[in-house]
Amino acid sequence: MLRNFAGNTISLLVLLLIFIFSGCTKFKKDGQIKEPGVVLTFDDDRVDNWYKNLPLLDSAGVRATFYICKYNRFTLEQKNKLSIIQSHGHEIAYHTTNHYNMMDYVYKGKHTIEELMKNEVEDGLKLMNLDGFYPTTFAYPYGAHSGVYDKMLMRYFKSVRGLNGTSDYSKSLAPMEKNEVIYGLVIDKNGGRSDESILRLMNSASENKAYAVFTGHDINSSISLSVTKGRLLKIFNHAKDLGLKYYTVSEISQ
Ligand SMILES: [Zn+2]
């Protein structure tokens, strides 16, 4: 009787250990163990430029998030390029149909919020869905937003991204928990941020166990809304030195 009891207890213990270890393996496989990192985001409809620069992103193992606007004007070739960008592990996210300032659209343009959501969010999302793109995160054009909009958009998305227009860099550090509203630090060459301040934010991400969220438009082009190759390489090297990982916005919005 006693032996049976001991045997059963041991069996139970073994089962429990198997359960715990298989649970841990699953935990690791799903990538749920969180480490500090860098979240690179790029906005608008610059798919030709991004496509051309895929090898640069690949060279550092970057997985970025591309917030798309004006999808209704994409050519078939551009849609194919976007699909290839997605297949390289990047996230395809949403940035409205016409890139209007959403606050002005309602408060100056005399539209209702419902009209805004239909015209600038739902219709464009449907078009993307038809082509196999399913954005789950959103960025505001010009970063213009309010708490009311944030709430409305949570019906469609896991998170919304504004811009950090302040001198408080820590606003662009997203914590390692479910993020709903995040603020990208603009790293375009006309964004008024120095390389040093960008690298410092990465140091903070590492020290504070957080994600540094950056926002750009073009990659390495002649327009002012463009991140230089030199700056990107500095970010890549610094991320490597600090052991920072790259995350998509969807991953930090879980
Ligand atoms: Zn934009």
Image: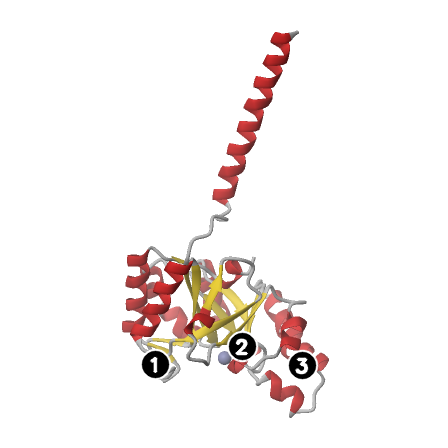
Residues marked 3 and 1 touching at CB (< 8 Å):
no
Residue neighbourhood size for the residue with mark 3, other residues' Cα within 10 Å, grouped as few (<14), some (14–19), many (≥20): some
Q: Nearer the viewer, mark 2 or mark 3?
A: 3
Where does the N terminus fall, quadrant-wise?
top right
Mark toward the start of the polypeptide (3 vs 1):
3
Q: Assess mark 2: CB under 8 A from ligand 1?
A: yes
- Looking at the rendering, which quadrant does residue 81 occupy? bottom left
* Helix, strand or loop status at disc 1: loop
Above or below, comparing residue 2 to residue 46 in the picture: above
Disc 2 from disc 3: Cα separation: 14 Å
Residue 142 higher or lower than 185, as above or below:
below
Residue on which the image places disc 1: 189
Residue displayed at 55% across by 77% down: 140
Going by the numbered disc 3, the residue's amino acid type is Leu
Q: Secondary structure at mark 3?
A: helix
Q: Which mark is residue 116?
A: 3
| 37 left or right of 98 in image | left
Tell which tag, 1 or 2, sits nearer the viewer.
1
Q: Position of residue 196 (x, y in %)?
A: 29, 73
* Vertical comparison of 107 with 27: above or below: below
Residue 69, labelled with which disc?
2
The CA distance from mark 1 to mark 2 is 21 Å
Q: Residue 188: x percent and y percent? A: 37, 78
Q: Nearer the viewer, residue 158 or 219?
A: 158
Residues at badges 2 and 3 in contact (C-beta under 8 Å)? no
From the viewer's perspective, tell me whether residue 10 is left or right of residue 64. right
Sequence-wise first label, 1 or 2? 2
The front one of 65 and 173 is 173
